[in-house]
Amino acid sequence: MDRPTMPHTKEWFEWLETRNPQQALFTRTVIAVAGKNDVCSICGDEPAPVYRSVTETMATLRLCSDCHRIRASQHERFELWEPSQQR
């Protein structure tokens, strides 16, 4: 994969499994419990817009407002991302 991909897709999980298999498994579980895939990649809450990491080109996540705030407090920078925004 040479560009960001929409979170929770087959391609996204393939990419994540090579970098963080535990997070991939955890996110699959979150999605299964929520019963849909447009929820926060971390906790399963909604709404959960798609964000792209500012520091890691390929990394995208769905983040609820709480998880986005927590990640920001840990100095992780994310910006809202739309699939049409190719960088």
Image (cartoon, grey):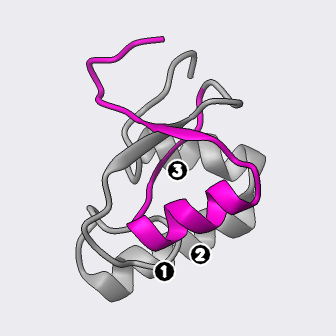
Would you identify the image quadrant in which residue 25 lies?
Answer: bottom right
Q: Residue furthest bottom?
A: 33
Query: Could you say which is closer to the camera, residue 80 or residue 24?
Result: 80
Would you identify the image quadrant in which residue 24 lies?
Answer: bottom right
Image position of 70 (left or right of 20)? left
Q: Report how far apart the C-alphas of labels 2 and 3 lie in the structure.
A: 11 Å
The type of residue carrying mark 1 is Thr
Q: Report how far apart the C-alphas of labels 1 and 3 lie in the structure.
A: 12 Å
Q: What is the x, y in percent for residue 52? A: 50, 36
Mark 1 lies on a secondary structure that is helix
Q: Which residue is at a point 73% across and 45% down the rendered structure image?
A: 18
Mark 2 lies on a secondary structure that is helix
Q: Is residue 86 above or below residue 39?
A: above
Label ID, residue 13:
3
For the record, the magenta segment spans 58-87
Which residue has dot 2 on it? 26
Q: What is the x, y in percent for residue 68? A: 51, 60
The type of residue carrying mark 2 is Phe
Q: Which residue is at a point 62% across and 68% down the rendered structure image?
A: 70
Please state, as top left, top right, bottom left or bottom right, where the N terminus lies in the image: top right
The type of residue carrying mark 3 is Phe
Of callouts 2 and 3, the N-terminal one: 3
Which residue has dot 1 on it? 29
Q: Residue furthest top?
A: 87
Q: Is residue 35 above or below residue 50?
A: below
Q: Is residue 81 magenta?
A: yes
Mark 3 lies on a secondary structure that is helix
Q: Which residue is at a point 36% across and 46% down the rendered structure image?
A: 50
Label ID, residue 8:
none
Image position of 39 (left or right of 18)? left
Q: Report how far apart the C-alphas of labels 2 and 1 lie in the structure.
A: 5 Å
Q: Which residue is at a point 47% across and 73% down the rendered structure image?
A: 66
